[in-house]
Amino acid sequence: MNTGDLSTLLVWAAATSFTIALIAYTVDMARIAEQAQKRTRAAVPAMAGASSGPVSAAAGSADEAAPDRSHRAEGIARSTHLLGVALLFGGIVLRGIAAGRWPTANMYEFTLVGVFMATLVLAIVQRRRAIPFISVVVLGLAVLFLATALLKFYVQAEAVQPALQSYWLVLHVGVAISATGIFTVAFAAAVLQVLRDGRENDHSHLVAPWSRGDGMRRALSGWAVTGPRFAWLEQVPDARRLEAMSFRLNAVGFVLWTFTLIAGAIWAEHAWGRYWGWDPKEIGTFVAWVVYAAYLHARTTRGWSGRRAAYFVFVGYACVLANFTVINLFVTGKHSYSGL
Amino acid sequence: MARYRPEGLEDTFADNPADTPTAPAADDAARDGGSRDAADDTAGGSSSPAEPRVVVPAIGFFGWLRWTWRQLTSMRVALLLLMLLAVAAVPGAMFPQRAQDEAKVATYLLDHPTSGPWLDRLGFFDVYASVWFSAIYILLFVSLVGCILPRTKVHFSALRGRPPRTPRRFTRFPAQGAGSSADEPETLVRAAEKVLRRPWLPLWPRYRTDVRDEGGGAWSVSAERGYLRETGNLLFHLALVGLLISVATGQLLHYRAQAIVIQGEGFANAKVAYDTFEQGTAFDPSSLDPFTLKLDDFESAFDPTTLNPRDFTAHVTLTEPGGDPTKKTIKVNHPLDAGGAKVYLTGNGYAPDVEIKDAAGNVAADGPTPFIPQNNVYTSRGVIKAPDVTGGQDQIGIVGYLLPTAQQVDDTTWQSIYPQPGNPMLVLTVWHGDLGLDTGVPQNVYELDESKMTQSVDEDGKPVTLYVKMGETVDLPDGLGTLTFKALPRYVALDLRHDPALLYVLVFALLAFVGLATSLFAPRRRIWVRAAPGREAGDGRTVVTAAGLARGDDVGLQPELDRILAALPLEPPAEPAADTSTTSTPTSTQETP
Ligand code: HEM
């Protein structure tokens, strides 16, 4: 078995490890939900039978560490998560050795490093007190991306074409991927923020009848954030703190993204003879950058902070992902380096 | 001092807490009042209407202008314009763009005869030069300037002023602390000031402080740090303006040229020497620096198994006016600087050197012709035109392929298996007639105008195909003459670009980056410490209270406050004072204002 194959094996092992962590975090989350549900039932016995009545969200209860989490599940989740990060790191290093260069030159490698960054940032953010929901979102995406990388993006490890032979491959691409990883965790925090905000404010679109397609609403009504299924939301930090967490990560991500943009322009000046040419990838990067700039402005604009600012994070993250997937796979441009 | 703020900006920090005791949680009415003041301030008048939206009809032309300006420079409109900019940039990735690929646009128009022309009229094939795209970014930048200049002024005066006075009550601040001591209030406050001013760089105090005697034996210090945050923010926005101006200047003053240079040949830097030449409106072509550049050799390397390229190097001789010829190399990622321009290696290929003699034995064409590579093994297509036939014979046009390393697949099929010239072969078909070169209409050298030509065919009516290896001479069909494949030099495609604004673009981009990082990561904080004689007169104890406020969310605020209090000779308060909460753990008091 050569180094390249060993690298692939390690990546598979990492994917498996993350899957176990994902399951363990889901179990952990389910336990919290169950306990929280029991408590609300006990507290409001009359509500137990109501199908979709809002359960009053006792805001503020979030700060005590959840007493009834599954410690075993959390332990397994943490250790397999870290194991996955380590395995993935090994896979990336071996990949670099097999190719004899920095391993960020095609889509397969981008994905590996991006997942590595996201899971590493996740581990750092969660080091003191894990919020299982954020892990479920990030690890879910991580497993999805690793599987796609292994099954769809995989290419043999080899040296790169002349246009990529530059130290900017490390700076520009490395930083772009790190930014993507950080945006991923920030995105998960923003999702949680919106859910938590809905529950805190007793606000769900699934509660009041819709003017059209009410059947669908009724089918989904079990999933109202105000309903018992989301009782675990009361165990997570309040929306304000989640927004602060999301912002801090997004701010770091945005600065790195700005660097990516500038570094990309400098590199384009060397390699393609112009610093900016509205190549599809450049457009994608620019659009995502502007959306995140809008997010920063939204946070400080009256009436747009909090929940609404989180929507910008969703759009921004969607742009980052589309820039990586849609533009690499379906649009031809100068950035045809996916290796596919 | 009235502070300027763009309308719609939510910023607890901009309110002077001394003026509004409930600053961190100022209710909407108070905020509205604040921003109206700010708005009045921008307009520079004191008589502007209190509620612009409502009184629009009555305010007349100038009032209306003022209202428009205020809207334009508001945060809400900035937000809207940013989102619009993001949306407007997207079609450029969905539709082919003239600036990048004219041919693709033409194809699109052919494929979509109904929608195409409409999209064209609306500018969808030239998005970044379209009226709507330009309108959005110009409005955005007008808004930005209108927003940033007044803020810069306010920031400068804040830099010169004193930190804001200590508010009377600390109740509503996100970070608080308290303690008591046997020391004198003034001693305690001076000690606190010393801690606050402890430098983090030599000679650069952490906080700017202001100690006041509040009367009744009470002393307080107010401190502020993080002016750098606002400085960074302003620097960032101003640098964006600089960036836009530099890019536009570059557009005016640049030129860009493309040349195909065959091994052993060269060119002089003059407009006529180029295949394409494009310039900004303010560039004067006679100012071109007349250096000459000659291609001596070209090297390439490929991966033997995947055939992907590994290296391209052009060895050239550069002669600057009045200078000696110097040997240089040009590689991808390593352009050559020549005469104020950069020379980029953008392509390469083979230019088969072919001699064609007509039926009378006269040379009708001689020399290398660039062929265009079609795939990764450099199967290249080209056209050789032989116009100089003698005595009224038909002109000859040759169309065909070069296979650098030819390998026979079956009787009539050959293919190239390697990009390097291992076994070069030309596979050609022959046309004769009128090449159409005399019409005066410029012709594409890579295409044959077949309208007045006939193709040579064999007795079955199939086109005659010639297979010519290097060094061979073959007879042309129909007795047209002979063809000799003499040699196989390489050629390179070079791009020249001159943009005098490049350095400024880079500098402004980097300034923007530095400004951004500072504005996002430098914490901006205010801290107040007050020491007053205790309530129970005569016990001789001093009660110390402290509060902190930060711009945005700031996890470090409470720890910093705790650190400052810990440096004072304090005991924790016996029971919480009426108007302060206890010094509690950072996590539970910390709030996002
Ligand atoms: C080309 C357009 C613009 C871009 C790319 C842009 C980008 C940014 C970015 C990245 C930030 C974050 C820095 C920070 O939060 O401290 C920011 C902050 C800010 N921008 Fe802009 N901006 C633009 C236009 C404007 C305009 C038109 C205004 C005024 C109406 C404006 C006002 C502000 C303000 C007040 C802040 C500080 C927000 C705060 O943190 O309190 N910007 N801008």
Image (cartoon, helix red, strand yellow):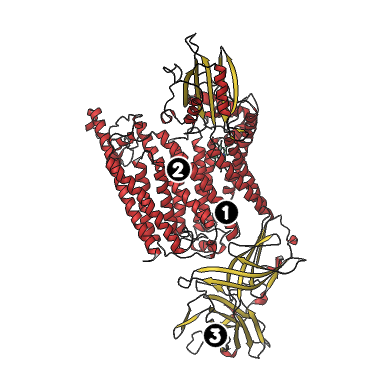
The kind of residue on which mark 1 rests is Ala
> Which residue is label 2 attached to?
A313
Residue B553 placement, left or right of A51: right
Disc 1 is placed on an element classified as helix
What distance separates the C-alpha of mark 2 from that of mark 1?
25 Å
- Is B425 rendered above or below residue B246? below
> Residue at the location (37% across, 59% down)?
A150
Q: Which of A167 and B27 is in front in this view?
A: A167
> Residue at the location (40% across, 64% down)?
A3
Give the mark toward the camera: 3 or 1: 1
Tell me, yes or no, whether dots 2 and 1 are on the same chain: yes
Q: Nearer the viewer, residue A142 or B275?
A: A142
| Residue B305 in which image quadrant | bottom left
Give the mark toward the camera: 2 or 1: 1
> Which residue is label 1 attached to?
A265
Picture coordinates of residue A218, whole percent (x, y): 28, 39
Instruction: Tell me which chain the residue with mark 1 is part of.
Output: A
What distance separates the C-alpha of mark 3 from that of mark 2?
63 Å
Q: Which of marks 2 and 1 is nearer the N terminus?
A: 1
- Is A159 rendered above or below residue B470? above
Question: Which image quadrant shows ligand 1?
Answer: top right
What distance separates the C-alpha of mark 3 from that of mark 1?
46 Å
Q: Most extreme residue toward the top, as rendered? A: B538
Res B468 label: 3
